[in-house]
Image (spheres, rainbow, N blue to C red):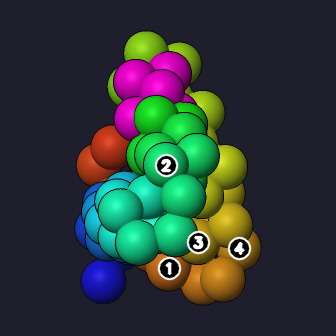
Amino acid sequence: MNVDKAVFVFAGLVVLTSLGLGHFVSPWWFLLAAFAGLNMIQAAFTGFCPAAIIFRKLGLKPGPAFAK
């Protein structure tokens, strides 16, 4: 697995977790999904993704999206 795939998996898990918590616990959890979406948009334009930095430090190989 490379950094790109790990970021996609992590973002998907955050969104799905947020949707589940928003439905079963409190609607305020939907803000987490909104934050994840905004973070993905800014990463697309700036190339800066905190999750990619963490996954790279954990030893995953960079993929084409986050190669530097």
Q: Residues within 10 Å of mark 3 (few under 14, many from 20)?
A: some
Image marks 3 and 4: residues in contact by CB distance under 8 Å:
yes
Image marks 1 and 3: residues in contact by CB distance under 8 Å:
yes
Q: Residues within 10 Å of mark 2 (few under 14, many from 20)?
A: few
The spot of residue 62 in percent (x, y) is 43, 63
Q: CA distance from mark 2 to mark 4?
A: 34 Å
The answer to whether residue 18 is seen in the rendering is no
Tell me which segment is drawn in magenta: 37-42
Q: Quadrant of residue 14?
A: bottom left
Q: Residue at x 40, y 24 (%)?
A: 41
Q: Amino acid at mark 2?
A: Pro
Q: Nearer the viewer, mark 1 or mark 2?
A: 2
Residue indicated by mark 2: 27
Decide whether the magenta segment is chiefly helix, strand or loop.
Answer: helix
The spot of residue 35 in percent (x, y) is 55, 37
Of label 1 and label 2, which has the lower sequence position?
A: 2
Q: Residues within 10 Å of mark 4 (few under 14, many from 20)?
A: few
Q: CA distance from mark 3 to mark 4?
A: 5 Å
